[in-house]
C-alpha cells in the first residue's frame, strides 16, 4: 500500500513540476518578447520581434503539449489505481464467497444430521440462527455489476469492524448502468467513506448507521448514501463539493469533488440533504435512450 501511495504522490509531483516548468518557460519568452519590443534598435527591429515571437509560439506549443500529456498521465495513473482497488475488492469478494460456500456445506450437513436424528425442531432452530448471515451475504450481490457488488461487500465489512451498521436497500440491479464499474466504485466508495468518517467523529452516538440505496426510475439510475451523524449546515451544501474543501482535522477534501466530477461527466447530478436526523447524498445518472422504458 505504501509503495502504491508513494508512486501516486510521485506522479502528482511530476505533473505539478511539468506544469510549473513549462509555464515558467512561457513566461520567460513573454518577458524576452516584451524586452525586444521595448529595447530593440529601430533598424531590423521587426526581424528581431518576429524571431522572438516565433520562438514564443514554439515554446508555448511545446508547453501546452507537455502539460496535456502530464495531465493525461496523471489521469491514467489514477484510473489504474482504481482498477487495482476494484480488482482487489473482487478478489476479496471471491474469497468470501468461497468461505461462505464451505460454511454452507457445513450447515447443510448439520441440518441433515438433525433430520436423520428425527429432530426437526432443532433443525429449524439451527436454520433460523444462520439465516440472517446468509441473507446479509446475499444482499450485497443483487446488482448486475461485479465491481459494485465487491465494493459493497468490502465496505460492509469495514463498517462492521468499526461499529457502524451499513444497511442496504438494493431495489434495482442497475442493468445497463452507463458508468463503468470501477468509476461507480469511486462514487459510492467516497460517499460511504465520507459517511463513515462523519460517524466516527461523532463519538457520542451509539447507534452509528449508514444507509445505501440503489434504485432506478424510468429515466435514471438512483443512488442514496445517508448517515445518522451530525448535520451539515445549509450554507455548506454547495461548498462541500469544491476541491480542497474539508471539515476534517486531516484530509485533502477531494472525495466529494471527485464524486461530483464523475456524476456530471455522465450527465447526472448529486445533491445533499441534511438535518439533525440524517444526512443524505442523493445522486442520479440518466439512462441512455435504449435503456429507458
Image (cartoon, helix red, strand yellow):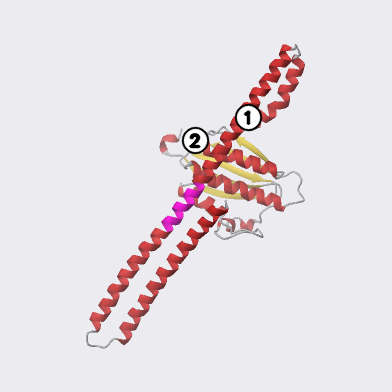
Q: Characterize the local packing of mark 2: few (<14), some (14-19) or many (20 or more) Cα atoms within 10 angstroms.
A: few
Q: Are circles 2 and 1 on residues that touch, CB within 8 Å?
A: no
Residue 218: assigned label: 2
**Circle nearer the N terminus (2, 1):** 1
Instruction: Give the residue drawn at x 76%, y 16%.
Output: 121
Q: Residue 63 at what x, y percent from top left?
A: 37, 66
Q: Residue at x 62, y 36 (%)?
A: 169
Let me know if residue 77 is in the magenta part.
yes
Q: Answer left or right for 159 relative to 54.
A: right
In the figure, 61 relative to 288: above or below? below
- Mark sitting on residue 258: none
The residue segment tinted magenta is: 71-82
Q: Secondary structure at mark 2?
A: loop
Residue occupying image coordinates x 66% and y 54%: 232
Res 45 quadrant in image: bottom left
Q: Quadrant of residue 90?
A: top right
Specify whether residue 108 is painted magenta.
Answer: no
Disc 1 crowd rating (10 Å Cα; few below 14, some 14-19, many 20+) is some
Which residue matches tag 1? 100
In the picture provided, is 3 more to the left or to the right than 127? Answer: left
Does the magenta stretch mainly form a helix, a strand or a loop? helix
Above or below — where is 292 with respect to 200? Answer: above
Amino acid at each position: 500500500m505504501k509503495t502504491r501511495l508513494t508512486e501516486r504522490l510521485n506522479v502528482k509531483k511530476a505533473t505539478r513540476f511539468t506544469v510549473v516548468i513549462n509555464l515558467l518557460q512561457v513566461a520567460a519568452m513573454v518577458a524576452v518578447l516584451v524586452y525586444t519590443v521595448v529595447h530593440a534598435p529601430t533598424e531590423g527591429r521587426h526581424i528581431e520581434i518576429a524571431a522572438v515571437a516565433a520562438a514564443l509560439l514554439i515554446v508555448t506549443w511545446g508547453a501546452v503539449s507537455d502539460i496535456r500529456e502530464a495531465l493525461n498521465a496523471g489521469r491514467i495513473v489514477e484510473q489504474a489505481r482504481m482498477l487495482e482497488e476494484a480488482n482487489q475488492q473482487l478478489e476479496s469478494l471471491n474469497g468470501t464467497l468461497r468461505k461462505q460456500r464451505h460454511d454452507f456445506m457445513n450447515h447443510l450437513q448439520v441440518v441433515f444430521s438433525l433430520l436423520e436424528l428425527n429432530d426437526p425442531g432443532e433443525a429449524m432452530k439451527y436454520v433460523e440462527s444462520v439465516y440472517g448471515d446468509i441473507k446479509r451475504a446475499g444482499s450485497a450481490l443483487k446488482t448486475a455489476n461485479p465491481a459494485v457488488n465487491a465494493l459493497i461487500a468490502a465496505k460492509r465489512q469495514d463498517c462492521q469492524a468499526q461499529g457502524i451498521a451499513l444497511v442496504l436497500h438494493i431495489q434495482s440491479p442497475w442493468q445497463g448502468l452507463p458508468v463503468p464499474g470501477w468509476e461507480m466504485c469511486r462514487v459510492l466508495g467516497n460517499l460511504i467513506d465520507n459517511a463513515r468518517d462523519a460517524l466516527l467523529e461523532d463519538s457520542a452516538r451509539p447507534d452509528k448507521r449508514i444507509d445505501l440505496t440503489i434504485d432506478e426510475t424510468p429515466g435514471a439510475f438512483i443512488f442514496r448514501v445517508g448517515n445518522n451523524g451530525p448535520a451539515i449546515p445549509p450554507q455548506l451544501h454547495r461548498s462541500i463539493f469544491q476541491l480542497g474543501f474539508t471539515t476534517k482535522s486531516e484530509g485533502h477534501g477531494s472525495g466529494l469533488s471527485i464524486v461530483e466530477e464523475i456524476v456530471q461527466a455522465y450527465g447526472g447530478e448529486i445533491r445533499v440533504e441534511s438535518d439533525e436526523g440524517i444526512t443524505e447524498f442523493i445522486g442520479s445518472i440518466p439512462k441512455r435512450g435504449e435503456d429507458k422504458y
